[in-house]
Each structure stands twice: as structure tokens, then as C-alpha cells.
Image (cartoon, rainbow, N blue to C red):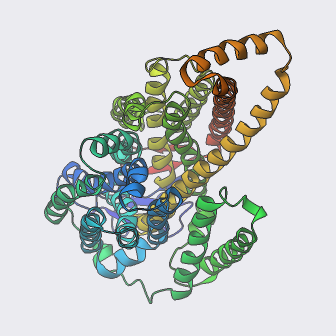
């Protein structure tokens, strides 16, 4: 009878297949274990669709809420600054639960915990939509973020364990539909719901999806034996407290830093000190404790996992800049409505939908490092294409690069996830996916914050440069000002004509300065993408054998 013997070492696990009593054959290169499916009683594709409903719902809700913020502020008599806490409160609770989800899954059972999280998220979504005041909405968003934080890592872990290593590329392709496509469709769906109905329906839409997800998970998802027999140990109170402290500090700094001039504000400096201290303490504790809440030792033992976490951080950084900046450009520079801007960038989802099934098929047949290099290279070239924008483009001018960007993302997310988890055992999968998704979200938060800051500062820089190159006594300036003054004089009266003309010219200068700010951001995004494409070769090569083993060279 054949047996499988797995080494506990994560970086170089060795699997031998031998008859009882025989010595395992010698191996000449590193191999990973042949991992059986975690849900043998159910069709893995049905189980995958079951958990992906929850992930798609959670990621989609984040994008929808961002579009509805101005309407929320107006409806609840809040300022735009206060309305941003609708996003911040959710992200803080979400970031805290993400890496801690593995302990809760081991303690209460992964299936039971996943169903509980979906129920909490769905119930909180109802209260978000029904909230009569901003403070009730913020409280409901905290609960919703806590419920949604575990959905991504648990879904990814179940997906990867449901398929053998050779087919994990297909599993990651399905997971990519939720993580890559949902943020693209979110602004479009959110704009339509908000304009046609109310911002409250951006939360109510989660209720039927959540009910269907609970039904399917209860029917088609099952806990593997190691989950049922797990003994996670006592809850790591210190680790959880430090996790709350540094993730909360980071999110508040990123969200409010630009408003208060970053280090120009005393409270920002104190918050950064708290962030650095708590993060360093959290890392030291997670490496030294016997049973930490988040096992960071996997980063030191498993090279491919560490490289994958670094690349998914850079991917989150780049993709969220593009997702956030493109609709903003169409709205702020070209004057599009939220719905129209969402429709213009929506074809990115078409590119992802085409690319994800393709990369799922070829990911185990081609060296994934080449896929990553090509994917990051194409994404960088599209970013350079975006840097050629101007104020005279039409809604379809950027259609091709937008579609190609979505297609290239398929060749990034799937190979990173596959290579990252190729040498991770099932027992470590929950911990690994929690860290993986946390770093992707942090990369996205940092990317959006830096892009927003750079947009404002580069806009100011270019405005100064443009003003310095326009001679107020020049013939062109005087003729243009005279023509506009004559026009406004006929409309507003002689006294108001000249000031209105100067105001209009100043607005045109601001528009041009903002345009150049977007150009700079897209150029820097291209630089990040090209750098990440080169770093893909830090991965060790992974090959899949016919006997189910995964070999790492």
C-alpha cells in the first residue's frame, strides 16, 4: 500500500512514495508534498464557486461604497471628510481580522467560521443600508469589516486545498474573478445603483448574495481532517493587540495624512511612532512566540512565499493606483459623472474575464516567472500609454489599453498566488493566505494614499511652472483675455467681464496642471511595474510531476 511521508520543513519539503517497510528513494532536488484535495466529497468547482460568492461580495462592496461617499455625506448631513470614515472604519476592522482568521478557523472550524462571517457581513450590510445617522453607519461598517476580513483568506485557502497542486492555477484564476474583477465592476455598479435608486442599495445588494453563499457553503464545503483535529492553543492576546494597534495606526495615517500635511501635524508624528513601535514589537513577538496569532516564521523558511508576498504587495500598490486614478481623471479633468467614468473603465473587467481562464489553463504548463515578467511588462507599457492622456480624448480613446491592462492583471495575480503557495502545506495554508491578502490590501492602501498625495503636490508644482512660463504682458495672453472679457461682459455685465475671464483662464491652468499630475503618477506606476517584473525571477522554479509532487529548483 503506498504511503505519503511529508517533511515538516516548509522551504524544502520532501515527499516519498514507497511501499511499506521500504527505504525512500534519494532525491536530487527539492520537492514539495503531493497534497490531496481537502473536499473529496464535493466537486471542487462547486466548492470553489460557493466560497467565491462570499469573496466577490466582500471585494465588490468596498468598491461600491467608495463611489457612494458623496451621496452618503449629503444624505446623513456629514462632511466629505467625515464620510471617508465609512471606508476607513471598514478597512481597519478588515485588516485586523485578515491575518487572525487562521486561528479562529482552527478554533471553531473553518466551515462554521466562514458561514458565521458571511452571516455577520450580510446582517451588517442591512444595518449599513438602514442607518439613520453617520455614527450608526460607522458602527455597522466596523462590524461589516470584521465579518468580511476573514472571507478572502478563508476562501483562498479552501480553493487551493480543494485542488491538487497541478490545478492550483485554475483555482487562483477563479479566485482572481473576485479579487481583480470585482474592484473594476464596483464603481460601475455603485454608480448605477446610487444614481438610479439610492446609496443604501449599494449595501442592500449584499443580502441576497450572502443568503445564497451561506446555502452553498453549508452544502458543498467541508473541513479537512487537520482542521477537525486542530489544537490552535490559547488566543494570543498580545499579538492581537499589537496587530490592532499597528494596522489601525497605518490606516488612519494613510487616510488622514494628506489632509493634515503629513509630518507637519504633531499627531501624525505620534501616530507614526506608535506604528513603528507596535509593528516592530508585533514582528518580534510573532517570530519568538511558540504559538503566535500570525506565524511569520513561514516568511523566513519559505523563499517562494516570501517573494510572492513582496510581489503581491507591489501588485496591490500598482493596480489600486490605476483603479482609483483612472475614474478620478475622467471625473476631475474631463467632467464625467461617476456612472459615466465607471462605464469608461469597466472594459478592464472584460480583459480580466478573458485572461483569467486562459492563464488558469497554461499556468502549470509554462514557467510562471515568464508569465509574471510579461504581465508586469505589459502593465507597465499600458501605464506609459495612460501617461499620454490629454484633455481632448474621447470616452473610447483609452479603450484598448484599459482592456489590455485587465488582461495583463490575469497574468499577474494567478502566477503570484500559484508560485507563492506551491510549497506551502495544507496545515500552513490558512496562515499563509491571511498574510498574503493582508499585504495585498496594505499595498493597495499605501498606493492610493501616495497617489492622492502626489496628485495634489505635483498639481501644485506644474501649476507654478505653467504660471511662470505665461507672460502676462504677452500678445497671446492679452488677446485671449480680451476675447474672454468681451464674452463675459455681454453675459454678466462690463464690470464682471474681466474678473470672470481671468477666473476662467485660472481654471484652465488648474485643469492642465492636474492633467500633468496624472501623467506623473502613471509614469511612476510604470516604473514600479517594470521593477516588479524583474523581481519575479527571485522565485525558485516550480514544476509539477505526474505523480502529483511539486518540485522546486
Position of the N terminus, as image quadrant, is bottom left
Q: Quadrant of residue 145?
A: bottom left
Kindly tell me whether residue 385 is visible in this rendering. Answer: yes
Q: Is residue 8 left or right of residue 427?
A: right
For image coordinates 37% across by 34% down, the residue present is 349
For image coordinates 34% across by 57% down, the residue present is 58
Q: Is residue 90 left or right of residue 49?
A: right
Question: In the displayed image of the protein, which residue is found farthest to the front?
Answer: 494
Q: Across the whole image, how many numbered discs are drawn on residues?
A: 0
Q: Is residue 107 left or right of residue 294?
A: left
User: Residue 143 appears at what percent x and percent y?
Assistant: 36, 72
Image height of 52 relative to 225, above or below: above
- Work out whether residue 248 or residue 419 is closer to the camera in this orientation and state it: 248
User: Residue 115 appears at what percent x and percent y?
Assistant: 24, 69
User: Residue 116 appears at what percent x and percent y?
Assistant: 26, 73
User: Residue 302 appears at what percent x and percent y?
Assistant: 58, 60
Amino acid at each position: 500500500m503506498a504511503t505519503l511521508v511529508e517533511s515538516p520543513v516548509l522551504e524544502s519539503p520532501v515527499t516519498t512514495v514507497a511501499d511499506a517497510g521500504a527505504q525512500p528513494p534519494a532525491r536530487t532536488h527539492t520537492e514539495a508534498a503531493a497534497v490531496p484535495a481537502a473536499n473529496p466529497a464535493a466537486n471542487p468547482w462547486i466548492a470553489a464557486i460557493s466560497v467565491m460568492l462570499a469573496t466577490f461580495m466582500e471585494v465588490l462592496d468596498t468598491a461600491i461604497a467608495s463611489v457612494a461617499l458623496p451621496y452618503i455625506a449629503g444624505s446623513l448631513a456629514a462632511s466629505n471628510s467625515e464620510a471617508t470614515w465609512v471606508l476607513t472604519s471598514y478597512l481597519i476592522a478588515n485588516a485586523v481580522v485578515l491575518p487572525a482568521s487562521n486561528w479562529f478557523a482552527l478554533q471553531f472550524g473553518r466551515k462554521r467560521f466562514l458561514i458565521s462571517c458571511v452571516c455577520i457581513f450580510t446582517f451588517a450590510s442591512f444595518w449599513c443600508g438602514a442607518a439613520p445617522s453617520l455614527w450608526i453607519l460607522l458602527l455597522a461598517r466596523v462590524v461589516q469589516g470584521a465579518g468580511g476580513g476573514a472571507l478572502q483568506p478563508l476562501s483562498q485557502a479552501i480553493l487551493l486545498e480543494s485542488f491538487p497542486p497541478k490545478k492550483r492555477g485554475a483555482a487562483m484564476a477563479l479566485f482572481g474573478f473576485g479579487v481583480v474583477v470585482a474592484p473594476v465592476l464596483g464603481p460601475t455598479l455603485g454608480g448605477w445603483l446610487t444614481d438610479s435608486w439610492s446609496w443604501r442599495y449599494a449595501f442592500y445588494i449584499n443580502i441576497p448574495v450572502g443568503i445564497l453563499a451561506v446555502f452553498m457553503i453549508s452544502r458543498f464545503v467541508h473541513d479537512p481532517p487537520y482542521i477537525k483535529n486542530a489544537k490552535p492553543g490559547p488566543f494570543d492576546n498580545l499579538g492581537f493587540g499589537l496587530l490592532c494597534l499597528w494596522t489601525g495606526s497605518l490606516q488612519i495615517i494613510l487616510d488622514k495624512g494628506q489632509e493634515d500635511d503629513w509630518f507637519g501635524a504633531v499627531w501624525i508624528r505620534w501616530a507614526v511612532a506608535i506604528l513603528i513601535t507596535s509593528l516592530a514589537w508585533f514582528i518580534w513577538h510573532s517570530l519568538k512566540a511558540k504559538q503566535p496569532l500570525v506565524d511569520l516564521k513561514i516568511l523566513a523558511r519559505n523563499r517562494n512565499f516570501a517573494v510572492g508576498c513582496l510581489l503581491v504587495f507591489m501588485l496591490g500598490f500598482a493596480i489600486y493606483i490605476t483603479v482609483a486614478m483612472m475614474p478620478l481623471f475622467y471625473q476631475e479633468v474631463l467632467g464625467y459623472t461617476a456612472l459615466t467614468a465607471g462605464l469608461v473603465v469597466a472594459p478592464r473587467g472584460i480583459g480580466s474575464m478573458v485572461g483569467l481562464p486562459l492563464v488558469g489553463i497554461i499556468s502549470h504548463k509554462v514557467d510562471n516567472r515568464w508569465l509574471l515578467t510579461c504581465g508586469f511588462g505589459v502593465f507597465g507599457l499600458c501605464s506609459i500609454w495612460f501617461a499620454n492622456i490629454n484633455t481632448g480624448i474621447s470616452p473610447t480613446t483609452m479603450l484598448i489599453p484599459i482592456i489590455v491592462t485587465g488582461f495583463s492583471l490575469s497574468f499577474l495575480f494567478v502566477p503570484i498566488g500559484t508560485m507563492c503557495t506551491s510549497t506551502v502545506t495544507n496545515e500552513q495554508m490558512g496562515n499563509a493566505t491571511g498574510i498574503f491578502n493582508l499585504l495585498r490590501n496594505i499595498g493597495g492602501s499605501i498606493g492610493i494614499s501616495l497617489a492622492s498625495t502626489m496628485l495634489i503636490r505635483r498639481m501644485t508644482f506644474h501649476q507654478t511652472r505653467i504660471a511662470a512660463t505665461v507672460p502676462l504682458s504677452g500678445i497671446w495672453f492679452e488677446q485671449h483675455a480680451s476675447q474672454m472679457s468681451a464674452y463675459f461682459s455681454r453675459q454678466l455685465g462690463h464690470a464682471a467681464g474681466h474678473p470672470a475671464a481671468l477666473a476662467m483662464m485660472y481654471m484652465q491652468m488648474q485643469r492642465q496642471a492636474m492633467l500633468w499630475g496624472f501623467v506623473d503618477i502613471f509614469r511612476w506606476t510604470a516604473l514600479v511595474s517594470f521593477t516588479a517584473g524583474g523581481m519575479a525571477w527571485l522565485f525558485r522554479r516550480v514544476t509539477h510531476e505526474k505523480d502529483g509532487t511539486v518540485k522546486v529548483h
